[in-house]
Amino acid sequence: MSKELEALRNFISECENDWKTQPKRWVDGAINSNVSKYMDSLKSILTPPTAEEVCEALSEYLQRKVNIYSDNTFYYTEQRQIGECDEIICGYGWENEHHTIAFEIDLPPHLITLIGRFYEAQQ
């Protein structure tokens, strides 16, 4: 799917350039405004989520603060009898460095997709 997304990104970029350099081709201001809103919407959909966005979504779902290590591993801190312990949610590239995501807890599909899009942008 990344090839399709890249093609769509290129199309959006070409449309934006064309729109900026030859606005008369885009008919009138009302259509320009609608095209601009549509392109902004497409850009936001195609933009991979940031680490902060993933942490926020995971925090909301798990009802606890989620952080990310420098190696892009998502975790939360749990209070235990012996003190605090970091619980891993998922990490990237753990299995023989073959660019795999290892999930340590069960998550719903929308969060798995969000995390996958985040890691895909890290390559």
Image: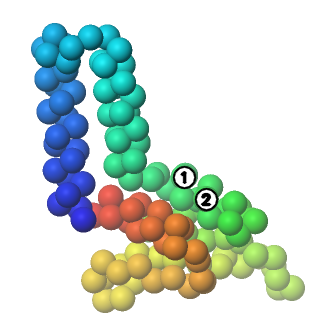
Using the image, tell me which numbered label, if any, was put on residue 100.
none
Q: Is residue 21 left or right of residue 81?
A: left
SS at mark 1 in the image: helix
Using the image, tell me which numbered label, if any, was put on residue 57.
2
Q: Quadrant of residue 116?
A: bottom left
Q: Which residue is mark 1?
A: 53
Residue located at (30% from left, 82% from top): 97
Colour scheme of the picture: rainbow
- Contact between marks 1 and 2 (CB within 8 A): the answer is yes
Compared with residue 24, is residue 102 higher up or lower down, i.e. above or below?
below
Front position in the image: 24 or 100: 24
Residue located at (19% from left, 35% from top): 13
Percent of width and height locating residue 68? 55, 63
Residue located at (59% from left, 83% from top): 106
In the rendered image, which quarter contains the N terminus? bottom left
Percent of width and height locating residue 21? 13, 15
Q: Is residue 73 left or right of residue 20?
A: right
Label 1 – label 2 distance at C-alpha = 6 Å
Compared with residue 113, is residue 84 higher up or lower down, i.e. above or below?
below
Crowdedness near tag 2: few (<14), some (14–19) or many (≥20) residues, C-alpha within 10 Å: some
Q: Is residue 42 left or right of residue 61?
A: left
* Residue type at the position of mark 1: Glu
Residue located at (39% from left, 47% from top): 45
Percent of width and height locating residue 79? 81, 76
